[in-house]
Structure formats: C-alpha cells, structure tokens
Image (cartoon, rainbow, N blue to C red):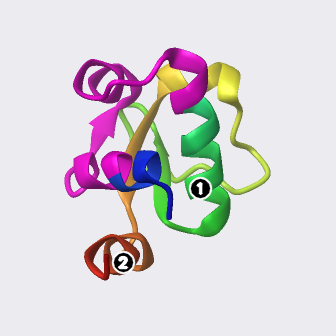
Amino acid sequence: MTPQEYDILDELYFICTFEQLLKNLTMDDLELRNHLEQLFRKGWLKVFYKGTEDEVESGEISKGQFENYHFLATKAGLKAHNTL
C-alpha cells in the first residue's frame, strides 16, 4: 500500500464525496482520481452513485464522473489499512 492509498483509506471510514477528499488530502485532482481507481480495482473501496445507495459496478467506473460518486472503504480496504 502506498502512502497516498493509506491517506485516502484513512478518510474513507465514513462515506465521502470526491470534493471532500480533494479538500482533506494533499493531492491534485488527477492524482486522486488515479489512486481512487486503483483502490477500486483492488477491491479496497466501494463507489456509489451520488444521492443513492446504488453501487457502481467495476466496469462502469469513470474517472471523468468522480464528482458524481461517493466513496467508502470496504472491509478488505480497512483491514489492509489497519495492518500497517
């Protein structure tokens, strides 16, 4: 796990928007998008459509739409985060 992934997962114990993550982390927009995508691919975070409880499926995630998503660490992500 990279230090950036650790910092992101640290923010995702509770559901967060992309804007909240940008505000709370010291990453630029593109860097955050790339790390979120990698965490999603690893199964370490869930992605929900904003304003719903509907999860985004693995093939549907789009970096261009991150402003329309909410993010939350998965059990596997929290376990990886807490083992460091």
Q: Position of residue 38 (x, y in %)?
A: 64, 52
Q: Which residue is mark 1?
A: 40
Q: Position of residue 83 (x, y in %)?
A: 31, 82
Q: Nearer the viewer, residue 78 or 66?
A: 78
Q: Which residue is mark 2?
A: 75
User: Going by the image, does 67 lie left or right of 18?
Assistant: right
Residue name at image x 52 percent, y 17 percent: 29
Magenta region: which residues? Answer: 7-32
Residue name at image x 61 percent, y 20 percent: 30
Let me know if residue 23 is in the magenta part: yes
Residue name at image x 43 percent, y 45 percent: 4
Residue 82, located in which quarter of the rendered image? bottom left
Q: Residues within 10 Å of mark 1 (few under 14, many from 20)?
A: many
Give the number of the disc on residue 23: none
Q: Amino acid at mark 2?
A: Lys
Q: Quadrant of the C terminus?
A: bottom left
**Image height of 59 relative to 67, above or below:** below
